[in-house]
Image (tube, rainbow, N blue to C red):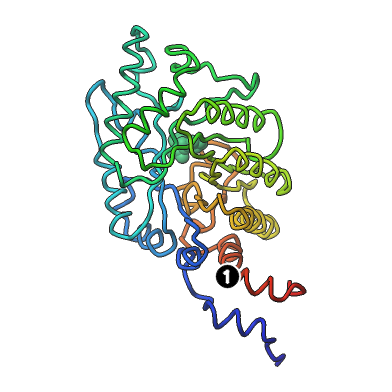
Amino acid sequence: MKLPTLLTMCAITTVSADEPLRKLADAHGIKIGAAVKGRLMSDERYTAVLAREFNAVTPENDLKFERVQPERGKFTFELADGIVAFAEKNGMAVRGHAFVWHRQQPAWIMNGEFSKDEWREILETHIRTVGTRYRGKIVQWDVVNEAIDDQTHGLRESVWLKALGPEYIEIAFRAAHAADPEARLFYNDYSGEGLGKKSDAIYELARDLKARGVPIHGIGLQMHLTEKPPTIGAMRTNMDRLIELGLEVAVTEMDVRLKTPATEAQLAWQAECYRDVLALCMEKKRSGTFVLWGFTDRYSWVPTAFKGTGAALIFDENFSPKPAYQALAGQLRRDESLSKAHPHSP
Ligand code: XIL
């Protein structure tokens, strides 16, 4: 048997191999999270893995407008409350998702005919009611989600743009800040992880909001990756420019969808993808939040949303860890001080 080198002995004694992700992440000050569905919080198999492995959660759907205010003035919080209580009990941070989005809105909003003043009042009341209910319990909020149009790269023609003009974004951030002054407020979007027109548009929006003193604290990079993701170099450059604006950058909805049925080679490639994105977060001090959009392939949104793809998460349909899980654990086990002390180590 080959004798272990001093380096591997140190690594083994510092952190044992069977520690869950959240414990490894705590050592780096990283929040590692998963999106969860309130209706599954009574499934013990689901909650056992969730509480063991993650120190953060995002309600996947249960804080969206249609769930929280299905009728004007009638708020329903049962499912979101359940998730928040579970998080409190298990020492997990909560990301709030999302105050303003063009999808998953109730009919009374989609078909609503109101004056501009009324629209403003509706938006502010929604944010104030939800935001104050969870004041001090939700650490980060996606205040505005997916506001940029994929074709024009201007603002998307949403209900809110039509109702209030571009100012709806600033109105939303100010209302969120008033509701919970401690919460970190994010603009969240997809396909803006690397470099390109969409990420330029996100950057420009963020720069403008910051310059005008709007209370925005971070950008959420959703990170719904396909088998042709942006390079890590492009993601790094993009993150750096956002960080230079004084913003935090969070990975908010990571999954890596594969053509199904997935081969071992694809799963191994996917593992590297997860590892590289986490490594990037660990490298950036202002990017300590790394949230997956679910954790088990059993309940992922991917096969429904993107036909012919799936296997996007780090646990399989039977809650067994996949290569991607091992890759994240391996990355979190890397001890920065050790690799700096031994520059030639892998
Ligand atoms: C998705 C949920 O996962 C699905 O369950 C729901 O049917 C549709 O929305 N970007 C977002 C998330 O910001 O809110 C979306 O979540 C996925 C894409």
Mark 1 packing: few (<14 Cα in 10 Å), some, or many (20+)?
many
Whether label 1 lies within 8 Å of ligand 1 gets the answer no
Q: Residue at 28% x, 59% y: name it.
A: 89
Q: Residue furthest left?
A: 74
Residue 146's place in the image compared with 323, above or below, is: above
Q: Residue at 44% x, 18% y: name it.
A: 160
In terms of depth relative to the viewer, which is nearer, 216 or 91? 216
Residue 202 occupies which quadrant of the picture? top right
Quadrant holding the C terminus: bottom right
What x and y, as percent, mark residue 136?
A: 30, 46
Q: Dot 1 lies on which element?
A: helix
Residue 65 occupies which quadrant of the picture? top left
In terms of depth relative to the viewer, which is nearer, 104 or 174? 174
Would residue 72 appear left or right of 346 to someone viewing this image?
Answer: left
Q: Residue at 49% x, 61% y: name it.
A: 29
Would residue 190 appear left or right of 85 to someone viewing this image?
Answer: right
Quadrant holding the N terminus: bottom right
Circle 1 is placed at which residue position?
Answer: 333
Residue 176's place in the image compared with 38, above or below, is: above
Residue 161's place in the image compared with 93, above or below, is: above
What x and y, as percent, mark residue 343?
A: 75, 72
User: What is the number of callouts on the image?
Assistant: 1
Q: Residue at 46% x, 64% y: name it.
A: 26
What x and y, as percent, mark residue 3?
A: 70, 91
What x and y, as percent, mark residue 246?
A: 56, 41
Q: For the residue marked with disc 1, what is the amino acid?
A: Arg
Residue 173's place in the image compared with 313, above or below, is: above
